[in-house]
Amino acid sequence: MKTRIGIMGYGNLGRGVEIAVNAAEDMVLTAVFTRRDPAGVKILSPDVPVVRADEAEKWADKIDVLIMCGGSATDLPEQTPKYAKLFNVVDSFDTHARIPEHFANVDSAAREGDRIAIISVGWDPGMFSLNRAYANAILPDGKDYTFWGKGISQGHSDAIRRIAGVKNAKQYTIPVESALEAVRAGENPELTTRQKHTRECFVVLEEGADAEAVEREIKTMPNYFSDYDTTVHFISEEELLRDHAGMAHGGFVFRTGKTGVNGEHSHVIEYSLKLDSNPEFTTSVMTAYARAAKRLFDEGQRGCKTVLDIAPAYLSDRSGEELRAQLL
Amino acid sequence: MKTRIGIMGYGNLGRGVEIAVNAAEDMVLTAVFTRRDPAGVKILSPDVPVVRADEAEKWADKIDVLIMCGGSATDLPEQTPKYAKLFNVVDSFDTHARIPEHFANVDSAAREGDRIAIISVGWDPGMFSLNRAYANAILPDGKDYTFWGKGISQGHSDAIRRIAGVKNAKQYTIPVESALEAVRAGENPELTTRQKHTRECFVVLEEGADAEAVEREIKTMPNYFSDYDTTVHFISEEELLRDHAGMAHGGFVFRTGKTGVNGEHSHVIEYSLKLDSNPEFTTSVMTAYARAAKRLFDEGQRGCKTVLDIAPAYLSDRSGEELRAQLL
């Protein structure tokens, strides 16, 4: 029997899950839930119902895993615990500093509902976390490096948009090539924030806005920009929509470490992603973990898990025999 | 209580395990077993007994995990099932084509002995397998590429040494840079064996041997060399020992795949290792999986497992809370 998937929220992530589930032979998309008027939500799958989010609980017996497609800032902290009482859920909560709190909330909700939940699934947190965990266990005497980009940071773009006089903006996070090379060469550099990434901003001004003042406000903004080398380009809205609408992203996780009687041998582990579509890759990861959620639930596992708690074989639609023969 | 580790076989791998276990705060090296005369085996740890392999079974209650440090060609197919009846074991069996058979033998032995066994632990099979499995589950519509090197291939070096007139030899497997670049750029190239790797041989001749005949025999050797661009250098034994005694190795695993309504988005996942010491990295992985073996055994798991069956958190000495806060 196919795993029945529900989608909560239909933006870029919801659409990405829809594509991934429709491509999986062992899954079927059962319903898409939305807080908007369902009549106004066009999805790709003609035979799948679009349902008001507040009617979701009627679907609790018809869905094996509900994939949460809201945002981490306000949606998921409220929605994931709420729906973990009714469904097995997978989310992509990515506010690193708040993961322990989110884990605790989701864990108690899922246990109350006798369900399983997998949080913080995607690429960072997600695939990058896995690589950090494996590499730390293998090379305990070592150093971690994570670089992001080139790609658009939503949070930094939003921060620019809140400046008076800014009509629209996109901000690219770009890893510094020489820093990547130094890490890759096993030099174990100590890198400041400024040495790891640069920030490039494309800004559309409101009519009559003071470009110089906006640029100064961006470059001196604490936390977001003041610790970085930041470049600001003023462009037209037409150019922004034409040239900066892509959702490419990526990044690099390194661990460099030593082994030997006197630490005489160096090793470099590098994992990198180059993604044309950040949301579609994220949801491809979430869909694989939805497969795991169903299997773990069927085995009797309950409560909140993360990618660190789940064996890789659970993500695959192949049998153990096939995996050993084909991929081991 | 610390996990008590035994080592079966004291060559490069055994020594690597010894170093890794001594560096781990939650493990203690309890005994080293050898088929040689223990009096002639000098180990790094002054207080650890070196014991004849045929006395190992007397140690069954004193050791939590026995790490098998023999070779895949003849040692492990016999030793791992034998000792899996008495101990929890971890091995690095790396003959890919024979893994299903080895798995079956070890599984039945471990179940007979009510023990857990983890086979094929290292980097390939091992970390490379994990990356293939994760990436295949995430990007089902895609293509896998594995490149090895630059590093010495034991099997190919042995094949050269068996040629009449050859006194000693080392063979480097080298990935072709332009092939790596094409894969990394998402071009999805179809690569022949010849296009992926070159082979570079350093050969010491017996006195009076015919260099031209040896070179021809190497370059035309089926399976090993005939499908590759092979370079042969004749050097003195002194040069071989001085310049080619290193144990550096490494490699690359890629998966490139498509997502989107019409496969319009490409993604590249790359994992790479650059290792100063192949055996010390391999045994660092084995030591982390020995930690997992003890925990899984304590949870009641029995029989044979591979890296694909084990959640990453089991490899770490950190708690779930620490992992979520620090590495997720």
Image: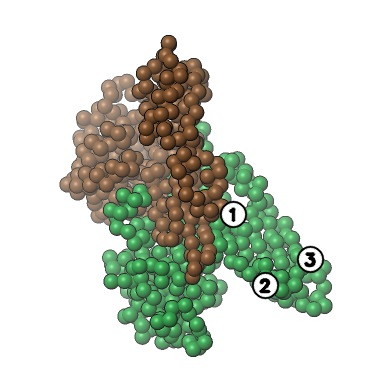
Chain colours: A green, B brown
Q: Quadrant of residue A113?
A: bottom left
Residue beneath label 2, please?
A: A241
Q: Chain of mark 1?
A: A
For the residues tagged 2 and 1, is the chain the same?
A: yes
Q: Quadrant of residue B32?
A: top left
Camera-side residue of B17 and A296: A296
Residue under the point 34% across and 37% down? B29
Labels 2, 3: front one: 2
For the residues tagged 1 and 3, is the chain the same?
A: yes
Residue beneath label 3, please?
A: A216
Residue beneath label 1, please?
A: A147
Q: Chain of mark 3?
A: A
For this view, does B35 lie left or right of residue B173? left
User: Amino acid type of disc 2?
Assistant: Leu
Q: Is residue A179 above or below residue A167?
A: above
Q: Chain of mark 2?
A: A
Find residue A1 and report its horizontal and vertical position in percent.
28, 71
Find residue B218 and report its horizontal and vertical position in percent.
42, 26
Q: Residues within 10 Å of mark 3 (few under 14, many from 20)?
A: few
Where disc 1 sits, the SS reads strand
Q: Residues within 10 Å of mark 2 (few under 14, many from 20)?
A: few
Camera-side residue of A41 and A81: A41
Would residue B151 be visible to someone looking at this image? Answer: no
